[in-house]
Amino acid sequence: MVIYMDRAEVPDVEQIRPEVLRYLLDKAQRQVGRFRMLEDYYLGNHPALRGKKGEGEVRVAVNYAKYVVDMALGYYLGEAVKYDSNEIARAGAQRGGKIDLSWLLYWYDFQNIAEVDLELGRGMGIFGECIELCYASSEQRPRPRSTWLFPGNAVLVCDDSVEHRKLFGMVWERRESLTGQQYYTMTVYTDRTIRHYRSADVKNIAFYPEGEVQEHWFGEVPMILYENNGPRQGDFEQIISLIDAYNQLLSSRLTDKKKFVDALLVFFGMTLREGDEGRLARERFLDGAPLDARVEYIQKTFDESGVQVLADALVREMHKMTQTVDMSDEKFSGNSSGQALKLKLLSMELLVKSKMRRMEKGLKERLRLYNRWLYAMGEMDLVDPAEVDVVFTVNRPIDEEGILDLVTRLQGIVDDQTLLSQLWFVKDPAEALENVRKQKEEGEKDE
């Protein structure tokens, strides 16, 4: 989470007063309940499953919270994010500048940064915000690495100016010693150092320094805030009441169905003899009944169609409010054309474009932190993040036949590299065009 403070309250970030740390801990603890509630919904621990069950009661929960988050996540982060120098960088390189991201991308690949991106995107979708921590690995020769932090235990402190510049960051945790004594630990990250603190207990909180002060080479506070949207709400936070209503409706529906199956068998004009009940249950047959006797089931009226209409309405509202597409809808795909599919996916496109813009800001901040570390190690030159494009690959349905037809008809009208860029299986159009040129030259030599 992020907390805004007057810079005058922290004149020296290297010597933070204990009361400031205690104030920040108190603010963070107030939000932990909300974050845990959202996490429970994503994991399927819904209120509909809690509490003591009544006799014959059935309880179920359909995890639309997870569906909404994972659907959007796979749509824009299903493939790894790519980094490429843009036109500004290429123009600078022609003037003698040097744009080389090889070492940066090597350390990204070394730690499989795509998995970290997925966790950050998932955290954004669940909690509405997420924090990434850049740190030094524990190897003999430390390397920059990244991890995501639970937003309830991580706080990024910024000033209250319009720019919201970072002051410092902190990560706290409640622990217990072998003697059962509970206490808090806190790690504070500034633009230069890492300091550790500890409290004696959890009642009279007073933090005191612990261990040695460590230095880092990221050049600024190594914590990055990723916001899902302006209000920092999760993808499903707006539809929690609809999820609860759907779970309640489905549970009641199954409970009624179970009671409908357990109907009462009533005999008219006769009385069962001793042992007839067991014989009837065992043999499903009973003889000796009077001619005018009859047997009927007493059943509860069950309006299945009316309940289904209400359930479908709740599902439609959930998809509408979260801007996600119901892939199980039979009317979604069918024989729709590529253009029709684009229109049906418009709401999802708008959602993920907003997510990509906000995530791009954080990814460029990470690039700047890693770049400063590697520059301090002498492994690469300083690079302006504005010279690097962050490229997301959206996993939308592809009209393969339509694309191939379009590329074929535009040959001779549009340059080959542009046409190759339209083919979904070509990752690098410039490299593909060069390979085509070499193949033609080799063919001419053979002739």
Image (tube, rainbow, N blue to C red):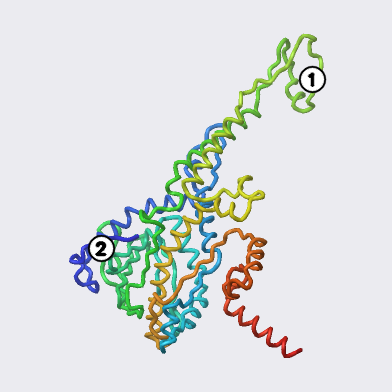
Q: Nearer the viewer, residue 135 or 287?
A: 135
Instruction: Tell me the residue that label 1 is attached to.
Output: 286
Q: Quadrant of residue 292?
A: top right
Instruction: Tell me the residue that label 2 is attached to.
Output: 162
Q: Residue furthest front?
A: 413
- Residue 236 on image: x %, y %: 46, 49
Which residue is located at x 63 percent, y 71 percent?
A: 411
The three-letter amino acid code for the residue at tag 1 is Leu
Q: Quadrant of residue 286?
A: top right
Residue 309 against residue 188 in the figure, above or below: above
- Residue 284 on image: x %, y %: 78, 25
- Residue 91 on image: x %, y %: 43, 82
* Crowd band around label 1 with a 10 angstrom C-alpha radius: few (<14), some (14–19), many (20+): few
Q: Quadrant of residue 358?
A: bottom left
Residue 417 against residue 158 in the figure, above or below: below
Which badge, 2 or 1, is on the more N-terminal residue? 2
